[in-house]
Amino acid sequence: MAETQRVATLTLDGKTYELPVLSPTVGPDVLDIRKLYGQADVFTFDPGFTSTAACESEITYIDGDKGELLYRGYPIEQLAEKSHYLEVCYLLLNGELPNEKQMNDFEYRITRHTMLHEQILMFFRGFRRDSHPMATMVGVVGAMSSFYHDSLDINDPWQREVAAMRMIAKLPTIAAMAYKYSIGQPMVYPRNDLDYASNFLHMCFSVPAEPYVVKPELAKAMDRIMMLHADHEQNASTSTVRLAGSSGANPFACIAAGIACLWGPAHGGANQACLEMLREIGSVDRIPEYIARAKDKNDPFRLMGFGHRVYKNFDPRAKVMKESADEVLDLLGIHDNPILQVAKELEKIALEDDYFVSKKLYPNVDFYSGIILEAMGFPTAMFTPIFALSRTVGWISQWKEMLGDPTGKIGRPRQLYTGLPARDYREVKDR
Ligand code: CMC
């Protein structure tokens, strides 16, 4: 970290405190308040972390005003066009794009870890048949720590590496099996002759009675969805993984925590919520009613798939995803789907409406990804699991980075206490 000679000064009760100004490689400067409590006996207050950098990281950079997203310095648009998911995984984990040999080795290792311990299949059966696949995933990924004892020691770099490989390789298998279980179909084993995205489609859509022939264009679109979701710096689920990992919890437990956090509709669950909202709207003539509800302060309804904490210009992932959505719908000959018509009209109205324009609420990645996934034949309940399996590499890269930071400490936020001061216990008869 480049530390400049600059300092900010804080004056409180007649005393002055110096706060060093830290300069990142790109992006806004950061005030270092680490010693503030010790020196001035005050905390800072920032619920939602809107102004707080919780860690130092070299992995992903977002410029919300420019609509820029970089993985290890590479723009997402270039990666989406020229790279592929496993190469992006290598990049996020290792910091550099692989040469040919490194890529082949990495791919070989990942494909040798795609199967699950056979006993995990019995574990699935403990879930209710109609469980949401995210519920199953949180449980099964957490349970991996009871199956893979040889990759739990976070202080052993080799075990950390094996845990990372296992999760990148097995999450698609777990997500696909959670889906198969939820619809009562036999689970389909992975095929290592297929690429990562094709194998996932195969595990979701083949049945023993009939193989699923993977269309290369759909596999490419799936691969792109995975790349676009692979990492997104310190979002809620990644911060959850870091916080869980900061206590020394094992990697499978940390990723299960990330999956749980991702599930919420304000985060990864927005893709499912968005498609459900489009269905609920149902027809173009009902859009004004929903726009009015979204603007109404007394109505908790929000346009799902719109807005972002960081992007205040456009979401660069949404731009690529929109192109991909158009390609997939063309390929599948879907033009008059009512949900699509509602989506297109909603996008148009919201982009012109003063409320959305002034608050900088643009369609985000979840708005378009749901349209593609629905066209591919996925039920809405699978949208967030696909986000989760794609984001796993980001979570692991951030977790590995955190463990490698010698200044790392357990995450322990403080609070602005507004409860009662100390008081004496009263016996029941006196209350
Ligand atoms: N529809 C209507 N109004 C909205 C929306 C929306 N989708 N999003 C924000 N607003 C309004 C909000 O009411 C507030 O208005 P005011 O200033 O008058 O009180 C203003 O815009 C700022 O909203 P905020 O909640 O303070 O913004 P935030 O940065 O805390 O929230 C967000 C960001 C993504 C949670 C929010 O925009 C949202 O709930 N969007 C819908 C859910 C969604 O699509 N989430 C996916 C995010 S992208 C994928 C991911 O990273 O997981």
Image: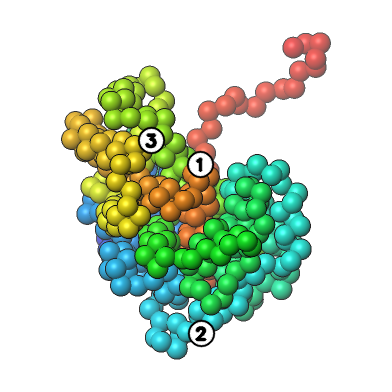
Q: CA distance from mark 1 to mark 2?
A: 36 Å
Residue highlighted by disc 3: 278
Category of crowding for the residue at label 1, using alpha-carbon neighbours closer than 10 angstroms: few (below 14), some (14–19), many (at least 20): some
First-in-chain label (3 vs 2): 2
x and y percentages locating residue 408 in the rendered image: 53, 63
Say which label, 1 or 2, has the lower sequence index: 2
Callout 1, which amino acid? Gly
Instruction: Please name whichever residue, 34 or 118, is drawn nearer the observer in this view of the structure.
Output: 118
Looking at the image, which is closer to me, 261 or 329? 329
| Cβ atoms under marks 1 and 2 closer than 8 Å | no
Q: Residue at x 67, y 67 (%)?
A: 116
**Between tags 1 and 3, which lies in front?**
3
- Regarding residue 57, the answer to whether it shows in the image is no
Q: Which residue is mark 2?
A: 105
Residue 244 percent across, percent down from the top left: 59, 55
In the image, which disc is placed on residue 264? 1
Element under label 1? Answer: loop
Look at the numbered disc 1 and say if its residue's Cβ is closer than 8 Å to ligand 1.
no
Frontmost residue, 13 versus 381: 381
Quarter of the rendering occupied by the N terminus: bottom left
Dot placed on the residue nearer the N-terminal end, 1 or 3: 1
Residue 351 position (above or below residue 71): above
Q: Residues within 10 Å of mark 2 (few under 14, many from 20)?
A: few
Secondary element under disc 3, as helix, strand or loop, is helix
- Say whether residue 22 is left or right of residue 246: left
Give the image quarter of residue 20.
Answer: bottom left
Residue occupying image coordinates x 57% and y 69%? 169
Q: In the image, 229: left or right of 311?
A: right
Where is residue 431 shown, x and y percent of the image?
Answer: 74, 12
Q: Amino acid at mark 2?
A: Asp
